[in-house]
Structures are given as structure tokens and as C-alpha cells.
Amino acid sequence: QPIGVREGCDYQYSGTVRKVERSSIERSLNSGDIVILTSLGVSPSGEMFNVPSEGLASTVAGAMNAEKLVFYLSKGACLRNEANKVVQNLNLSEAKQLLSQNGVKNDGWKIQIPDIITCTNQREFLGKAGWGMTALGNGVKRAHLISPVDGALLQELYTRDGSGTLISRDLYDGIRRAQVEDVNGIYDLITPLVLEGNLVEREREQLEKDINTYYVYTRDDLIVATGQLRRYDDEYAEIGCLVVHPDYQRGGRGDAMLGYLERLCLESGATKVFVLSTLTVQFFIERGFKLVTLNDLPESKREKVDVDRGSKVYMKEISSSQELVENELMWDR
């Protein structure tokens, strides 16, 4: 569809995407074809409009529920820090701050970069970063900005450090410490697992008493995930009651909740994090936890373990926040 007249400027045959024929694209992909989209689009009235290729990619990626969108930069256009090293990661808030500090405006259909910025490489990075943020706003999880060098794409997608700059949505947005008002929501969330025998029963009164040890992941005021964090002697901490609502288990919320609690552990000085589980052992194994014995637990915890449940103990040692960042990057890579 045409952009039309904006602020007195007639954009004539410049347009924006009105609709993405998702089903047609999916049929081609399912047939093993590679889909190449032109930046020329046709309106219902038969007129042809030119759509910025970056804007087209951002819109289509969102419509296709893509996990990633990759933009190639010109050689030398990557973002570097004061040490002249490529900035590997920006979360959404950091990327917004970067654009704001440079006076960049994202109108959804156009990325406006101030004329005072004359460096071609800088303008290119800021522009594509802006379109990457548009993609994130459309539901894409991550946008990658990489240079056109041999092996860059493989390195970006299949190594921890990548080759360019990764812009990701704020992974922990929506997670907070639980409040007394959340007791009923937590109780309703965990009750099905309690009835199945996969979770230790927690009465409402006990939840209310221990509410400061619980954290919740909310969406539109609905508690979609919860987790409990307890500190023990020295450098030990326990993560328990990690539950995700069945309708939201494919959204990475279990990873987000676990990662958030691990960060809290590290901030409080706990580097040895353990869980007791009878059912979800594979989940924790895949995330770096290793099987240990009851003797490896702090004494104050060993005294409280119900051995009749037959729970297995898994522990993970966290050495630094960089390790957690690397784990986050591998969730979808």
C-alpha cells in the first residue's frame, strides 16, 4: 500500500507492506524451495509500489514467526566498542538507547537518521539496527547484523561469540518477585503437577508464608510461569517449583525463568545451584546441571529432603555472568 503524503512530502510510489501471503511462502518452503522476495509489491488496485528491502524483511519475518532475521552489513560497518572490538550483544533496551543517543527515529515505515551523521558505515549500522528492532517488535526473537566475510553466517549462528552484533528482545521482561496477590495464581498453576505427583504439595498458606522466595512470569496479568529460589549455607542455592503453563511451554519461558533465577543466584554470591527433580531431569541436564548425590548438598538442606520421593539431585556451578550470557545465546542458536 502507498505511504502517501507524510509531513507535506508525497512519497508517490514508495509503499509499505499491507499483507504477507504466508501460506504461499510456507508451501514453497515445504516443497524445498528457496523463496526470494522482490521489494516491488502490487496493491489491490493493481498499482506497483517499492518497499524498502529491510522493511520487507522485518515484516515478513514477523509474519512467518521467524526466530531470527539476519542483515548483512557493508564491510567495516559493524559496531565496535572503545577497545575496537565488535559489540557482540545488545538487548532491546540497549539498542533503543543507542538509536536514541544518535537521534535516530523509527516510524515503522522509515528509519530516519540525522543528517549530522555523515559516516556511511555508521548510518548503515544504525539503519539496519532500526529495522532489526522493527522485526523484534513484530515478534522475531533475534536480529543479527553481520559483515560479508567468509564464514560469517556460520560463525554467527553456530558459535557462542558469533561474528557480528546480535540484538535480542529483553529475555526477562515480565519476570518479577511474587507478591501476596499472586498466591492464587501460583497455586492454580502448580496444582495439576501436584495432583500428578510430580511436584511437592504446597498449600496456599505455605505459599503466602514463603512468597518472597517465589518469582513469576506474567503476560497480561496471567501468571504463565513460576519458580522458587532459596539460599543455603555458603555458596549454595536451590531452584524449585519451576513450572510453566502448558499453553506457553514453547515460548522459551522455562529457559527465561531458569536464567533469571541463575542470575539472582550469582548476584547473591551463590555459585552452586541445585535442583531436586523426579520428572524434568532432561531439561536440567540439557542446561548444564550434573547428577550429584545428597551428600553434595549443604547440611541444612540434607536434613529436609524426603528420601521416599526418590528425587534426583542435579547441580550446576556458575562461574561468571558471561557464562550465563553465553547460555542465553545458545537457547535458539
Image: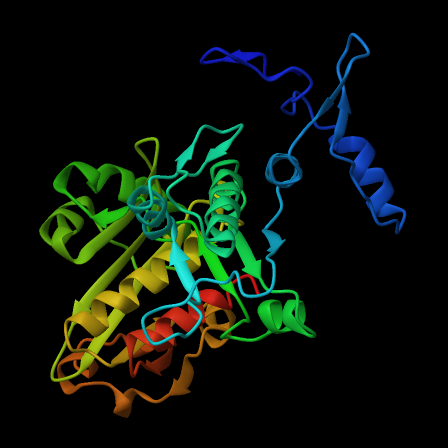
- Relative to 196, is 271 above or below? below
- 101 or 310, nearer to the observer: 101
- The residue lying furthest to the bottom in this view is 295
Residue 263, x across and y down, in percent: 26, 67
Residue 144, x across and y down, in percent: 55, 57
- 212 or 265, nearer to the observer: 265
- Can residue 184 be seen here? yes
Residue 52, x across and y down, in percent: 64, 34
Residue 94, x across and y down, in percent: 33, 52
- Relative to 163, is 187 above or below? above
Q: Quadrant of residue 294?
A: bottom left
- Can residue 197 be seen here? no
Q: Quadrant of residue 221?
A: top left
- Relative to 21, is 102 above or below? below
- Relative to 139, is 234 above or below? below
- At a point 22% along the width and 71% down the height, the residue shown is 265
Q: How many marks?
A: 0
Please state, as top left, top right, bottom left or bottom right, where the N terminus lies in the image. top right
Relative placement, left or right, of 245 versus 93 is: right
- 74 or 62, nearer to the observer: 74
- 167 or 187, nearer to the observer: 167
Please state, as top left, top right, bottom left or bottom right, where the C terminus lies in the image. bottom right
What colouring method underlies this structural image? rainbow
Relative placement, left or right, of 200 versus 29 is: left
- The residue lying furthest to the top in this view is 45
- At a point 65% along the width and 15% down the height, the residue shown is 12
- At a point 54% along the width and 71% down the height, the residue shown is 162
